[in-house]
């Protein structure tokens, strides 16, 4: 596996960060995405395995005909690479993003956090380096962790514990740990049985946000960065505020010449989304839903909750899949009251995350909790996608294996 961004590009991207800080709210027209991918799309064999797993139905017949007649050679913005293609590739690596792009993801996610020297990198959480890299096996770096690894302990290693230069020495890996291990090398094991370590062996790097932008841009695809909630006190070191952090993310797209129309910045902190909508030209902010009790809100309570988003002109909301669905008396997957409230208020809906639960023979777990009674095989993923498309009307879905959502989107003309 080769590195997909050269050292020269990496150095230039890092060097440009200080200049980007001065671009507050500016707009530079430029890259908007392309209909053409760098290489032909390849969905591989998994979508066909899922298709064969389906029970006989009209939807299965439709998809079978598509599989026979339609060439799977185009990407789709409906298919969003969640942390890349992290069912099989180490999440938030250039290798994982590359795989998502090959699989036809029209939009790719970089979860964004910051380092000790305030550089933006792609990690799912500010403090996940102990499970997503080999940092605990590096004694000199392990010692710098907020809570260093010790046998039987609970390490906590944060991006803000290290400079970018130090993080660039690490090897990214599948997100996993084995707390019963008696050594650091054992601790970084524990990979789920449906995942693999195959793509971790050539020491994939932790990418900068700018490196992710350059790769996705090179493929003609689009962007949905998530500003991760800080796990350190803000303002960081007394003068780096949450707004500085939110603006820094936007400035890097401006610096890279990316038009706002190709970017959907996300955050679970709705104040970030309101900030982007009211203070920048990047108006496609996505309000991620992390208050799962909201599933049971009344219509009036929902209206009160989303009023700040509406006042700011926010257009997108993104709850997990299960919050959008319910089961009818006959067992059909239908839109939930919560999903209907979102539609009634005029928000576009994105959801997460397909292909994250492993085999679905036991009901799918957390992501399927409102429809688990009708989930017992991998083929039910296409039935779920059909409900999300036709009942809810989602405009995009995150997937740990975008080939699956690309296949479905292609067959449905999405």
Image: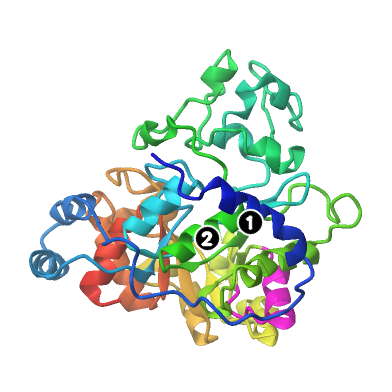
Q: Is residue 187 above or below residue 338?
A: above
* Residue furthest out toward the top: 182
Is residue 279 part of the magenta span, yes or no?
yes
Residue annotated with mark 1: 13
Picture coordinates of residue 189 (x, y %)?
48, 25
Picture coordinates of residue 404 (x, y %)?
29, 58
Q: Is residue 59 above or below residue 138?
A: below
**Residue 175 in view of the camera:** yes
- Colour setting: rainbow
Tell me: 88 left or right of 314: left
Kindly identify which numbered label has been placed on residue 214: 2
Is residue 191 part of the magenta span, yes or no?
no
**Residue 400 in view of the camera:** no
Kindly identify which numbered label has been placed on residue 24: none
The quarter holding residue 240 reads bottom right
Tell me: 91 left or right of 282: left
Judge by depth and name the residue closer to the eye, 236 or 388.
236
Judge by depth and name the residue closer to the eye, 263 or 148.
263
Query: In percent of the image, x 31 and y 70: which residue is there?
Result: 387
* Residue furthest out toward the right: 238
Query: In percent of the image, x 68 and y 28: which residue is there?
Result: 155
Secondary structure of the residue carrying numbered label 2: helix
Secondary structure of the residue carrying numbered label 1: helix
Q: Are marks 1 and 2 in contact (CB under 8 Å)?
A: yes
**Image quarter of the N terminus:** top left
The residue range painted magenta reads 269-285
Q: Is residue 326 above or below residue 135?
A: below
Specify which label sits upstream in the sequence, 1 or 2: 1
**Image quarter of the C terminus:** bottom left
């Amino acid at each position: 596996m080769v590195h997909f961004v050269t050292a020269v590009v990496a150095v230039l991207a890092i060097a440009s960060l200080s200049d980007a800080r001065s671009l507050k709210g500016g707009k530079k027209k430029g890259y908007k995405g392309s209909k053409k991918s760098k290489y032909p799309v390849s969905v591989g064999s998994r979508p066909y395995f899922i298709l064969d797993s389906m029970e006989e139905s009209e939807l299965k017949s439709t998809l079978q005909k598509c599989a026979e007649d339609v060439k799977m050679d185009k990407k789709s913005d409906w298919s969003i690479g969640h942390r890349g293609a992290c069912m099989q590739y180490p999440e938030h690596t250039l290798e994982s993003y590359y795989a998502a792009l090959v699989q036809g993801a029209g939009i790719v996610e970089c979860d964004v956090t910051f380092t000790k020297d305030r550089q933006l990198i792609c990690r799912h959480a500010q403090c996940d380096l102990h499970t997503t890299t080999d940092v605990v096996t590096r004694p000199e770096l392990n010692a710098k962790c907020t809570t260093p690894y010790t046998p039987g302990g609970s390490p906590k290693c944060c991006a803000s514990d290290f400079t970018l230069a130090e993080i660039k020495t690490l090897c990214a890996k599948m997100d996993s740990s084995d707390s019963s291990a008696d050594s650091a090398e054992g601790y970084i094991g524990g990979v789920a049985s449906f995942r693999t370590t195959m793509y971790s062996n050539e020491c994939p790097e932790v990418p900068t946000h700018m490196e992710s932008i350059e790769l996705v841009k090179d493929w003609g695809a689009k962007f949905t960065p998530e500003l991760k909630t800080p796990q350190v006190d803000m303002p960081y070191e007394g003068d780096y505020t949450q707004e500085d952090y939110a603006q820094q993310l936007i400035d890097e797209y401006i610096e890279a010449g990316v038009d706002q129309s190709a970017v959907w910045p996300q955050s679970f902190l709705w104040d970030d989304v309101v900030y982007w909508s009211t203070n920048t030209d990047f108006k496609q902010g996505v309000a991620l839903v992390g208050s799962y009790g909201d599933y049971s809100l009344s219509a009036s309570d929902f209206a009160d909750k989303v009023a700040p988003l509406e006042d700011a002109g926010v257009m997108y909301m993104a709850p997990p899949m299960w919050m959008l669905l319910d089961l009818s008396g006959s067992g059909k997957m239908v839109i939930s009251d919560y999903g209907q409230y979102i539609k009634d208020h005029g928000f576009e809906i994105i959801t997460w995350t397909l292909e994250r639960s492993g085999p679905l023979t036991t009901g799918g777990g957390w992501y399927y909790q409102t429809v688990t009674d009708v989930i017992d095989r991998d083929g039910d993923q296409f039935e779920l996608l059909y409900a999300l498309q036709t009942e809810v009307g989602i405009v995009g879905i995150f997937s740990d294996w975008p080939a699956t959502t690309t296949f479905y989107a292609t067959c449905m003309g999405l």
